Image: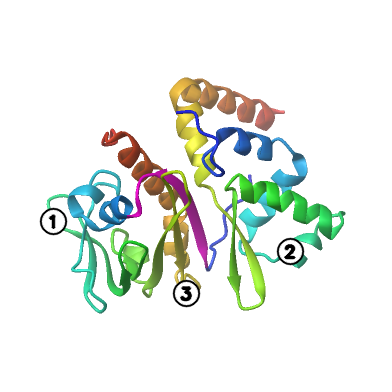
Amino acid sequence: MTTMTAQATQVYSIFIRATAEQVWDAITNPEFTQKYFYGSRIESSFQPGAPYLGLSGDRSETLVDGEVLEASPPSKLVTTWRALYDPDTAKEPHTRVSWEIQPAGDGIVQLTVVHDGLEDAPKTAESVAGGWSYVLSGLKTVLETGAPLAG
Amino acid sequence: MVTYHPGVDDDRVFRALADPTRRHLLDRLFERDGRTLTELESELEMTRFGVMKHLRVLEDAGLVVTRREGREKHHFLNPVPIRLIHDRWIDKYTEHRVAALADLKSELEEAG
């Protein structure tokens, strides 16, 4: 087994049977993100320059902080991103996460997450490497079946 | 749900993974992501056309995503379809048995 080396850019993509508006809602509505994003509430006004926060379910802890760089509903959201849930990643500089939602025909959209700016954030790169697959897989399940994930 | 849409079809993922060259390409991207065709080609004893053909199959299965940066096209490993197959096939039926067998294999190999 080869170990994963930290990548400066990571790309994750998934096809979801939903509309672009539904996917936009799923990534910007805290009640919705709580169902698949490790139980966290994503809170922001989604205006450029506004804070972008990932809070614990009871809002007592900030797990992720960042700033909105671009918000073009329902097709593109770009924010900075720093993971505060781990003391090692919290010390690293902000990275960048872009969500791109593209129609793919037949009532399907392609959601692509590009996490870049990871050159100086190797701990963050390592930490999110498995996480995004889990988050996107969960997002698809919740949108397509309406069922919140167990655990 | 049965669907034949590109990128949401399990068959494409299984077919793409059923070839050693394509698995090798995924391993190369796992080690260092975002490579160009030229970089990938230099590590394989295969024509540029052959590598392109394999990359196309991986792309159609959603296992590789390409991004353009200026003139260059970079290839990224997309692990999400493998995660979906894991959730659909491994979790559901066999995770504990697979784990037990994997443990047995590593124990035997270490002992040997």
Q: Which residues are the magenta region?
A: A9-20
- What's the amino acid at mark 2? Leu
Q: Nearer the viewer, mark 2 or mark 3?
A: 2
Which type of secondary structure does the marked residue at label 2 adopt? Answer: helix
Q: Nearer the viewer, mark 1 or mark 2?
A: 2
Q: Nearer the viewer, residue B4 or B31?
A: B4
- What's the amino acid at mark 1? Arg
The image shows residue A83 at horizontal and vertical percentages of 32, 63
For label 2, count other residues whose C-alpha is less than 10 Å away and answer few (under 14), some (14-19) or many (20+). some
Q: Is residue A57 left or right of residue A66?
A: left
Q: Is residue B10 left or right of residue A109?
A: right
Q: Assess whether mark 2 and mark 1 are in contact (beta carbons under 8 angstroms).
A: no
Q: Kindly identify which residue carries mark 3.
A: A120
The subunit letter for the residue under badge 1 reads A
Tell me which residue sits at (52%, 27%) in the image: B99
Question: What is the CA distance from the residue labelled 2 to the residue labelled 3?
Answer: 26 Å
Q: Is residue A45 left or right of residue B111?
A: left
Question: What is the CA distance from the residue labelled 3 to the residue labelled 1?
Answer: 29 Å
The subunit letter for the residue under badge 2 reads B
The image shows residue B54 at horizontal and vertical percentages of 74, 49
Residue A59: numbered disc: 1
Q: Nearer the viewer, mark 3 or mark 1?
A: 1
For label 1, count other residues whose C-alpha is less than 10 Å away and answer few (under 14), some (14-19) or many (20+). few
Residue B6 visible in the snapshot? yes
